Image (spheres, grey):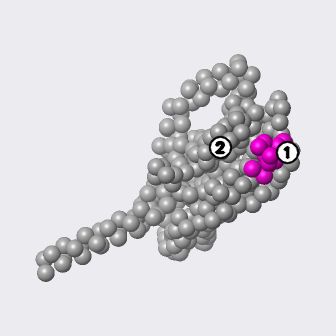
Amino acid sequence: MRTLYISLLFLFLVLDGAAQAKKPTIMVVPSRQWCFSKGYFQEVDNFGTLEKVPDYREALDDNPDLLLVISKINNLFSDRGFPLKDLSQMLSSISRSNAEDMALSLDREASGKGAIAESLFDKVRNTAKADILIELQWTVNSAGPRRSITYIMRGLDAYSDKQVAGAEGTGSPSVSAETAVLLEEAVLQHIDNFNARLTAHFDDLFVNGREIKVEFRKDSNWQYDFESEFNGDELSFAIEDWVAANTVKNRFSTDEATDTKLVFNQVRIGMFDENQRAMDARAYGRNIQRFLKSKFNIESKIVTKGLGYVQMICGQK
């Protein structure tokens, strides 16, 4: 009887551990709209184009409610077994690497390759490598001494930027509760359904793969293009065949195919590589790079934006 009890207990622990392992890693961030409406943004020069990006660091430094709100929502997800990445810690990590990034940018400018343009939003995602971003937006409603919170919470796949879960509502009014507590109480009304959608999406990723975007471009000095023939086959078709053979269930769509550009969307890649390391767009691009070099002796450069977008510059190293 004792042996049976121990066996059942061990089985329960194994199953419980497996269930925990299937939960996505999340990171809670203020929504872009919330940041922009509060003036927490920067305009960065992205190769000549001004891009408006949230300034999470200024938001955390300037708005005392934000850190409390993120902490409260983090606790709600942590209590339900979700692994967390903390925005404040990610920003600290990014700050430590800024000097290295600046030096690299100067080196690239000196070599004529141009500066690396990466928004703070992309830096946060690349550093955290969370599966899901939880975007929060809220407003405080006042009616005399009573206050309530209206909120919108969205779960975004950090690789595809697609919304996979959502919740919104208005909490009960209160006279004394602080903003973070009001938001916590409002979110509690919908969090279980929200979490169920997150888990269902994550389970689907294990079956059908992560979704990324892959783009091929021709370097201006490259003597070939994607309509050139290699080994009796047009390069664009050879690349498309490789993508088909290296996606989960051959799932992808060819959105654009010209002599200078190929675009593949909804490219489904496995969660892990053969060494059980997590796959992202950069790792997938590395496999493409090896294929192009070994099969056609084509040099290529990998450029990534976030976790779910990779650009292959053919003819450049």
Q: Residues within 10 Å of mark 1 (few under 14, many from 20)?
A: some
Q: Name the residue carrying label 1.
A: 227
**Kind of residue indicated by mark 2:** Phe
Q: Where is residue 187 in the image (x, y as percent from the top left)?
A: 53, 68
Instruction: Identify which residue is drawn at 18% across, 77% down.
Output: 5
Q: To which quarter of the image does residue 17 belong?
A: bottom left
**What is the magenta range?**
227-238
Instruction: Identify which residue is drawn at 73% across, 27% down.
Output: 114
- Say if the magenta span includes residue 231: yes
Q: Name the residue carrying label 2.
A: 291
Q: Which of 313 and 140 is in front in this view?
A: 313
Instruction: Identify which residue is drawn at 51% across, 54% down.
Output: 272
Q: Is mark 2 on a helix, strand or loop?
A: helix
Q: Taking 280 as reference, is 74 left or right?
A: left
Q: Where is residue 308 in the image (x, y as percent from the top left)?
A: 64, 51
Q: Is mark 1 on a helix, strand or loop?
A: loop
Q: In this view, does 102 lie above or below 154?
A: above
Count of marks overlaid on the render: 2
- Asked if residue 40 shows in the view, the reply is no
Q: Nearer the viewer, residue 66 or 24?
A: 24
Q: How crowded is mark 2: few (under 14 residues within 10 Å), some or many (20 or more)?
A: some
Instruction: Identify which residue is drawn at 80% across, 46% down.
Output: 232
> Closer to the N terminus: mark 1 or mark 2?
1
- Going by the picture, which residue comes out furthest to the bottom? 1
- Going by the picture, which residue comes out furthest to the left? 2
